[in-house]
Image (tube, rainbow, N blue to C red):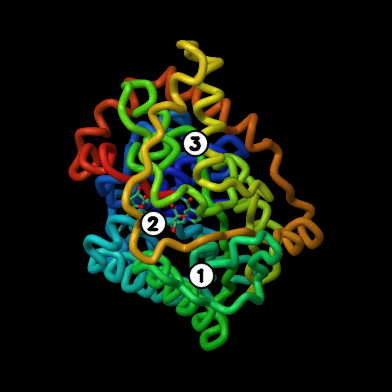
Amino acid sequence: MKLLITGGAGFIGSALVRLAVARGHAVVNLDALTYAACEENVAPAADSPLYTFERADIRDRAALDRIFAERAPEAVLHLAAESHVDRSIDGPGDFVETNITGTYNLLEAARAYWEGRGRPEGFRFHHVSTDEVFGSLPADRTIKFTEDTPYDPRSPYSASKAASDHLVRAWHKTYGLPVLLTNCSNNYGPYHFPEKLIPVVILNARAGRALPIYGTGENVRDWLYVEDHADALLTVLEKGRVGRSYNIGGENERSNLELVRTLCAILDELCPKESGFYAQQIAFVADRPGHDARYAIDPTRIREELGWRPSVTVEEGLRRTVAWYLANEAWWRPLQSRAGVGQRLGTGAAA
Ligand code: NAD
């Protein structure tokens, strides 16, 4: 298939680009190259004749129309977004513009293209979203988010993603655009931008700096290895029912404190110092405003309907991730100097 992937120079988008090209799909990567992007993320795919890059902003409708006309994709996977919760608290405007208005522009450009070509049967608009749209679960680990859980977003980031999900569903109900939606839990893995919790912990630990944890560290997240997310996205694209949404999760609930302790134990093994060296650097910092207590995904639908399940355990995925950061300083070192990143490394980190 010929895929138009937005946000393909970001963390998850680049994993998807790499996997899609490896599986023989033609990929047009549409990305504005914001602070969160890194062209090196797609280096393993970039030399392939199947790969093309379009630097464009999803807020620019004319650019989107041109790209649809020239590149004639058979499906869109929409990942471009402002994605960092802390940044959305400091400056929500960009989140509204990119995540809501940008998604609206992309939907309209896709609809014009799809209608202009006589509504081809196989066309798909796959919108990639987050479990954060569902709000916060009780800490007692009894219930999980299903596809029927009512939306209850709490942060400017999750509210903007929720709004974009509603637009995508409306374009299906109102105009018949063949859409798919996925809501995924927290991702981790190689090429994760060094302002997010897991890279912050690995890099701070290595540098002998504090390992910042919000509040008491009891907030629980479900963690999924990014390459498993990319695989799930291609599975939904190929086999998912039009108009339907699928929750994607790793069934790996960890409190932030448990997660950081696991990372410290892996570092103890891979970079040995005296026993318990890294865990001593854990430092609790003032909690994030409106910090959701717990997210957990019930992935029954994607497992039973589409036969998808993650391939990597969280222990194995975290080990691979730590090893990757230890081996790839040339990738992360320059990114630490980008706007705002160094400041956050010393204070608090978002998941
Ligand atoms: P990211 O911040 O690493 O990458 C986002 C990419 O989008 C960047 O390459 C950036 O340049 C591009 N972009 C931003 N604004 C743009 C614009 N106006 N026009 C064109 N390109 C633009 O994000 P990520 O973590 O890879 O997340 C990708 C998608 O997956 C997002 O939609 C996010 O909401 C969703 N998601 C993320 C997670 C997670 O744990 N990271 C979990 C579930 C869902």
Does the image show residue 116? no
Seen at 40% across and 52% down, the residue is: 215
Q: How many marks?
A: 3
Question: What residue is disc 3 on?
Answer: 260
Q: Viewer-nearest of labels 3 and 1?
A: 3
Residue plotted at (57% across, 26% down): 319
Residue found 51% across the figure and 83% down from its top? 170
Q: Quadrant of residue 296?
A: bottom right
* Residue holding disc 1: 135
Query: SS for tag 1?
Result: loop
Which numbered dot is residue 80?
Answer: 2
Mark 2, residues whose alpha carbon is within 10 Å: few (<14), some, or many (≥20)? many
| Disc on the earlier residue, 2 or 1 | 2
Q: Nearer the viewer, mark 2 or mark 3?
A: 3
* One can see residue 323 in this view: yes
Mark 3: secondary structure: helix
Q: Nearer the viewer, mark 2 or mark 1?
A: 1
Residue type indicated by callout 3: Val
Q: Amino acid at mark 2?
A: Ala
